[in-house]
Image (cartoon, rainbow, N blue to C red):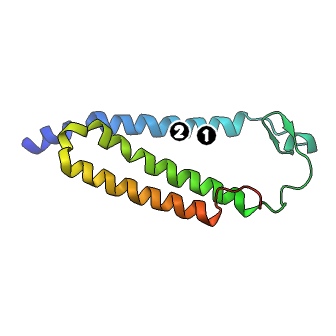
């Protein structure tokens, strides 16, 4: 008797999963059936942000571009780790302060290393 009551508790979840899957399958089938089948060179051409394509997309890109992007993500994620400390500033007391000082020192060492290696210089 107790097992039946526990199984009934999962009924709303099961119904929600069925409705969600039914919606996805129905949408995929309807878009496939109702979509137009017109193909042309203009329609199949790549188009993004209102700018027409120009030239070949397979040209070499400077490594500096990727280094800048990677460094941005790296330092951005590191800065995000300061927020939990700022929220719990009073409750962490001296131990939390020391942990953040060590983290900030490592952060600055990495920043200094990248600065000395020329990672922030766009053109050399």
Q: Residue 4 sits in which quadrant?
A: top left
- Residue 54, percent from left and from top: 91, 47
SS of the residue under disc 2: helix
The CA span between labels 2 and 1 is 6 Å
SS of the residue under disc 1: helix
Q: Residue 107 carries which label?
A: none
Q: Is residue 118 above or below residue 19?
A: below
Callout 2 environment at 10 Å: few (<14), some (14 to 19), or many (20+)? few
- Seen at 29% across and 33% down, the residue is 12
Picture quarter with the N terminus: top left
- Residue 90, percent from left and from top: 20, 37
- Asked whether 107 or 40 is in front, the reply is 107
- Residue 110, percent from left and from top: 49, 61
- Asked whether 69 or 124 is in front, the reply is 124
Residue wearing tag 2? 24
- Seen at 20% across and 44% down, the residue is 92
Q: Residue 28 carries which label?
A: 1
Callout 1 environment at 10 Å: few (<14), some (14 to 19), or many (20+)? few
- Asked whether 111 or 77 is in front, the reply is 111
């Amino acid at each position: 008797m107790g097992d039946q009551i526990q199984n009934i508790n999962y009924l709303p979840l099961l119904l929600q999963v069925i409705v969600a899957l039914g919606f996805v399958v129905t949408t995929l089938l309807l878009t496939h059936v109702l979509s137009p089948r017109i193909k042309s060179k203009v329609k199949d051409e790549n188009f993004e942000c209102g700018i027409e394509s120009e030239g070949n997309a397979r040209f070499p890109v400077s490594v500096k571009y990727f280094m800048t992007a990677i460094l941005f993500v790296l330092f951005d994620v590191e800065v995000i780790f300061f927020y939990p400390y700022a929220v719990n500033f009073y409750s962490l007391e001296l131990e939390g302060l020391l942990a953040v000082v060590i983290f900030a020192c490592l952060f600055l060492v990495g920043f200094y290393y990248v600065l000395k290696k020329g990672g922030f210089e766009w053109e050399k």
